[in-house]
Structures are given as structure tokens and as C-alpha cells.
Image: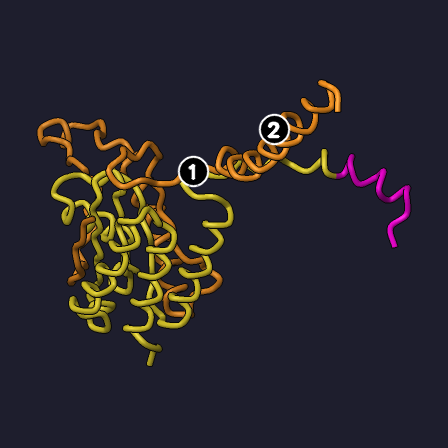
Chain colours: A orange, B yellow
Amino acid sequence: MNGAEVVLVYVCIPGGFTAIVASLVFLPGLTRRPRYKPGEPWPHEPVFYGPHPSMLDEQLQELQAGAAAESVPAVTARRRPVLTAGPASAATPPPVETPPVPAAQARGGAHGDW
Amino acid sequence: MATGSELVSFEPVRERLPKVEEPAPFTIRQLARIDEALTMASRETGLYFTVYVGALDVPIRGHAERLHAGLGPIAGFAVLLAISPGQRQLEIVTGTVSGLRLPDRSCALAALSMTASFGTGDLTGGIINGLRMLSDQAGREG
């Protein structure tokens, strides 16, 4: 066996085999999204998920439709000008419209930390 | 069997497809699992399950209750799982109706299971386990 064959058998073949195994081990980790680790800061924007409306029962669908309908006049009321011209309104201060505060409907629940 | 011409025409079709950007912080696959769990829990129980993942203002409970109240008329039937991974805090809020079917003890059990998963870094698994436990506890509507 000459020098080239020695290098091929004892260096290239083990080196190639090691490279293949290493790529199989480490490549999936490099392409994967970083996993959440407790204690690290959370850089993402807040997200709010709910069930798809078509999957809800009729009562919940009606309530959700009612919530959507209620929100329309509430938004337009805030955009409506509160100050009107005229002698009567000039003496009295214009009514201040405050954004609607949702009624608290929380009953209970639980708290946890990790 | 696919012919050579079909294989050739496959590449341009793939290129025309819109690139779907995976919304952070979950992958599409994780979102699909959460969506399925949310839908199944809501459909089985008749309650409105929602999940919030993000920072919570202090006091945590107050912020979670504001989020819950922001759901509007449906809030009474709603169950909110508010998770703040950065602060390592979890808050479960039940409504006036959903609270009747989900006592605080059941919520605490679900919270314990969820925080165990969150502690190992498995956010998706914790959310899904929590939703399943809560829907099992609430039972079927009626």
C-alpha cells in the first residue's frame, strides 16, 4: 500500500463517515426554530387565539354576533363630534363621552407559575 | 403514473404558490394543533375557550380579567388561558357561566399540568393539555 492509499483508507474514509454522521445529527437542529426556554425573554408580539366561529354552537354564535354588532355604534359614537354650535350648548359644557368599559364577568380561575 | 411532462410542470406550480410566513411564536403545525384543541374544547363543552400568549401587566390577574372582559357579551361563557412565557406566569380566568362548570379546583389542576409542560419548554403541549383537561372537567353542555 503506497502513501496515497494509506491516506485514503485511514483519513478520508473515516473523515467522510464522521462528516456524514455529524451532519445527520446537527443539521436538523440548525434548521429548526429556536425552542422556548424558561427564563429567557419573550420577544414575540402578544397573540390571542379563539375557536373558529363556525364551530361554535348557536348560542355562542349569537353572542359573538351581538358583540360584533355592539362594537359598531360604540366606535361611531366616539368618533362623533361632542361639541355642537348654539346658545344653549354654549353655556353648558359639552358632554364628555368615555369609551365603554366592559363589565367584569370574571368569576374565578387559577394562577400558576413555572 | 406521473409522466415526464407532469414532473416538469410541477416546478413552476410550486414557484407560483405564495410563500406562507410562519407567524411567530408558533409554527404552522403547532398552530394547527392549538386550533384543533381550541375548537374541540369549545364544541364539546359549549364554552368559549381562548388563549392569550404574551406579556401581562402587573397585577397579572387584573390584566387577564381585562382581556377576559374585552371579549364582550360572550365573556360570561368564556375561559381565558393567559400565558406570559417571559414572566413565567399563567392565569386562567373563567366567566360567570363557565365558572359554574369549571370550579377553581379544576382550573388549578389544569394550571398545574400546564406549568409542568411550560417548565420543560413545551408551550404547545401545555396549552393543549390544559384545554383538554378543562374541557373534560366542564363536560358536555346540557
Q: Nearer the viewer, mark 1 or mark 2?
A: 2
B115 shown above or below A59: above
Q: Nearer the viewer, residue A65 or B78?
A: B78
Residue B7 magenta: yes
- The location of residue B66, given as percent across then percent down, is 20, 48
- The location of residue A24, given as percent across then percent down, is 57, 39
Do residues under tags 1 and 2 come within 8 Å of each other at their CB atoms? no
- The location of residue B92, given as percent across then percent down, is 22, 57
The disc at residue B93 is none
- The location of residue A59, given as percent across then percent down, is 37, 69
A99 shown above or below B91: above
Residue A78 magenta: no
Quarter of the figure that contains the N terminus of chain B: bottom right
Q: Nearer the viewer, residue B95 or A103?
A: B95
* Residue name at image x 78 percent, y 36 percent: B11
Q: Which residues are magenta?
A: B1-13
> Which secondary structure is most common in the magenta stretch?
helix
Determine the secondary structure under disc 1: loop
Left or right: residue A66 compared with residue B27: left
* Residue name at image x 29 percent, y 44 percent: A74
Crowding around mark 2 (Cα neighbors within 10 Å: few <14, some 14 to 19, many 20+) is few
Which residue is the site of mark 2?
A15
Q: Nearer the viewer, residue A100 or B83?
A: B83
- Amino acid at the residue labelled 2: Gly
B121 shown above or below B43: above
Q: Chain of mark 1?
A: B
Which residue is the site of mark 1?
B24
Image quarter for residue B42?
A: bottom left
